Image (spheres, helix red, strand yellow):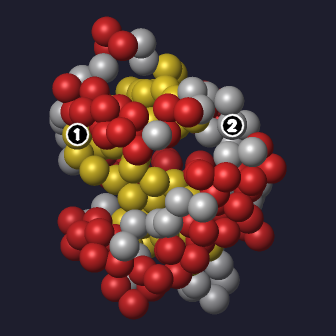
């Protein structure tokens, strides 16, 4: 299994991975999250063109997990990390996060950031095990504050969310 840039003809597979991974939220009563549509192809293509859409592939070079990242306030922001449930609990997400960290380091970016649910076992508790810590409101950069405002407008604050950081 390897990590590489997503190909343009694979972007619909990323949507499939996210939809499959989203079904896990149904067990937590988070129907709105489970039913949320993935990014459209044109948005995914923007990440791919920017060089920040990585996939973890199976032995047949087919994507089974992916990570999308933005640069926000001088840090690499993990916008989306999704692992297909059939490939979960095998270190796929962690390897993608470590790959993103290596990319950020090579680009001279000092940290990774993300926003996630606090009470979902494969969200904030998982990211803490990956070296992230929670930021309080006073530590939020302007870009993270803006992202949180957009999330609130979408109704994602129905479930507790947190911004997290991992220094590199």
Question: Which residue is farthest top?
Answer: 138
Q: How far apart are marks 1 and 2 (CA)?
A: 24 Å
User: Which residue is located at x 42 percent, y 18 percent?
Assistant: 135
Foreground residue, 61 or 155?
155
Local crowd size for mark 1, using a 10 Å CA cut-off: few (<14), some (14–19), many (≥20): some
User: Which residue is located at x 30 percent, y 20 percent?
Assistant: 140
Which residue is disc 1 drawn over?
72
Q: Viewed as shown, does residue 79 lie left or right of 123?
A: left
Which residue is disc 2 drawn over?
120
Q: Quadrant of residue 19?
A: bottom right
Q: Position of residue 148 (x, y in %)?
A: 35, 32
User: Which residue is located at x 31 percent, y 32 percent?
Assistant: 149
Q: In this view, does 29 lie above or below 117?
A: below
Quarter of the picture holding the C terminus: top left
Foreground residue, 58 or 84?
84
Between label 1 and label 2, give the one nearer the viewer. Answer: 2
């Amino acid at each position: 299994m390897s990590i590489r840039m997503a190909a343009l003809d694979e972007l619909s597979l990323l949507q499939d991975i996210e939809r499959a991974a989203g079904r896990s939220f149904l067990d937590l009563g988070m129907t709105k999250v489970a039913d949320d549509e993935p990014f459209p192809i044109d948005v995914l293509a923007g990440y791919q063109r920017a060089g920040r859409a990585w996939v973890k592939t199976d032995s047949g070079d087919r994507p089974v997990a992916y990570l999308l990242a933005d640069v926000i306030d001088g840090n690499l922001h993990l916008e989306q990390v999704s692992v297909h449930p059939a490939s979960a609990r095998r270190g796929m997400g962690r390897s993608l996060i470590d790959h993103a960290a290596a990319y950020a380091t090579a680009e001279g970016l000092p940290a990774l950031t993300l926003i996630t649910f606090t009470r979902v076992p494969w969200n904030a508790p998982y990211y803490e095990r990956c070296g992230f810590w929670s930021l309080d409101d006073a530590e939020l950069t302007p870009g993270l504050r803006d992202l949180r405002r957009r999330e609130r407008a979408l109704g994602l604050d129905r479930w507790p969310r947190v911004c997290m950081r991992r220094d590199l």
